[in-house]
Image (cartoon, rainbow, N blue to C red):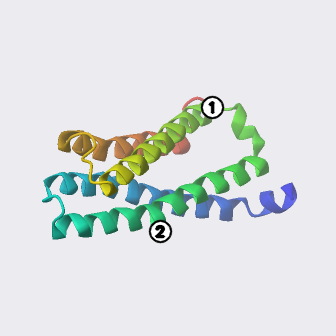
Amino acid sequence: MIDFLAAHYVWLKALHIIAVIYWMAGMLYLPRLFVYHHQAEPGGELETALLKQEHNLLRIIVNPAMIAVWTLAILMLIANPTLLSTGWFHAKLLLVVILSGIHGVYAGARRRFARGERPRTERFWRIMNEAPAVMVIVIVLLAVLKPFA
């Protein structure tokens, strides 16, 4: 199995990058929907549409993409376990774990919006809209520049 994964490592990496792009697209869009949700009239047409968009975004794009990111990352680690001994990888992994936690916060907020609550503030969601963008910039820089190698 390790030989098979190693032989197909570049494919795993390409699929991993594609999954990251989809995950981050959703992670950047969902808090923007939450901002709009705060501005929507409770029980109104816009709120109904936003609830459906938030649900579908998580269920169809964000959740599967995150699962693919982690699955492909684990397969790449099995194929290339030396990554675990590099400092840049530890920093990258920490940031990805934090991003996964933010994903969980978003999922919980979506459920609260669906119950008719307005979790946090509009300002909070505007700030959270930027957090994944900043983190993914650092993650890409770590992965490409490998500063602590």
> How far apart are the alpha carbons under marks 1 and 2?
37 Å
How packed is label 1: few (under 14 Cα within 10 Å), some, or many (20 or more)? few
| Residue at the image point whose x is 27% and y is 54% from the top | 116
Q: Quadrant of residue 127?
A: top left
Q: Is residue 28 left or right of residue 81?
A: left
Please state which of residues 23 and 115 is positioned toward the viewer in this rendering.
Answer: 115
- Residue hosting label 1: 149
Q: Secondary structure at mark 2?
A: helix
Q: Percent position (x, y) of residue 88?
A: 58, 33
Q: Quadrant of residue 45?
A: bottom left
How packed is label 2: few (under 14 Cα within 10 Å), some, or many (20 or more)? few
- Residue hosting label 2: 60
Q: Secondary structure at mark 1?
A: loop
Residue type at tag 1? Ala
CB-based contact (under 8 Å), mark 1 and mark 2: no
Q: Quadrant of the N terminus?
A: bottom right
Q: Percent position (x, y) of residue 118?
A: 24, 47
Instruction: Work out whether 66 lies above or below 52.
Output: above
